[in-house]
Amino acid sequence: QVQLVESGGGLVQSGGSLRLSCAASGIIFRVSTMAWYRQAPGQQRELVASITSDSSTNYADSVKGRFTISRDNAKNTVYLQMNSLKPEDTAVYYCHFRRLIPRTDYWGKGTLVTVSS
């Protein structure tokens, strides 16, 4: 079965950095588009960044220039390097994979990132 396991969250001061990791299993990782979403308290879940099988990337405007998504196909792992963190980046960050046929969304359990001012 599909498993997505996030790690790397924690408490960091404003301006600091964190790197999130998501280890995937049960999928053909090298051909999969992977993504990071986040959900702040009282807010809807939003797309942060995505990366295709050929490593094309897409970012939310709010994180462009600060966050970098990358992948290591040998390790079946996708990363999110977060620099210049702001208090508004505080959220639970989720790893995401969508199987196309049948269309099914898979989520990790999430990792909490807290940025103090």
Image (spheres, grey):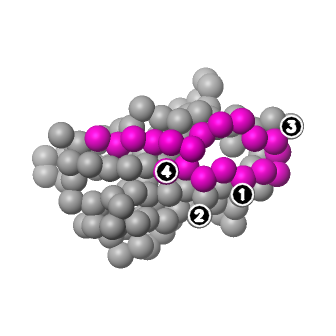
Magenta stretch: includes residue 93: no
Q: Residues within 10 Å of mark 4 (few under 14, many from 20)?
A: many
**Earlier along the polypeptide chain: callout 1 or callout 2?**
2
**Earlier along the polypeptide chain: callout 4 or callout 2?**
4
What residue does disc 3 label? 117
Q: Residues within 10 Å of mark 2 (few under 14, many from 20)?
A: many
The amino acid on which the numbered mark 3 sits, given as a three-letter code, is Ser
Identified at 28% across, 67% down, the residue is 30
Mark 4: which secondary structure? strand
Identified at 72% across, 53% down, the residue is 17
Q: Do tag 3 and tag 4 residues touch (Cβ < 8 Å)?
A: no
Identified at 13% across, 47% down, the residue is 102
**Earlier along the polypeptide chain: callout 1 or callout 3?**
1
Residue 49 visible somewhere in the drawing: no
Residue 21 has which mark?
A: 4
* Residue furthest out toward the front: 75
Mark 1: which secondary structure? loop
Q: Nearer the viewer, residue 44 or 92?
A: 92
What residue does disc 1 label? 83
**Stretch of the chain drawn in magenta:** 3-21
Q: Is residue 39 left or right of residue 35?
A: right
Image quadrant assignment for residue 55: bottom left
* Residue furthest out toward the top: 42
The amino acid on which the numbered mark 2 sits, given as a three-letter code, is Thr
**Earlier along the polypeptide chain: callout 1 or callout 4?**
4
Percent across and percent down for residue 35 are 43, 53
* Residue furthest out toward the left: 102
Residue 45 has which mark?
A: none
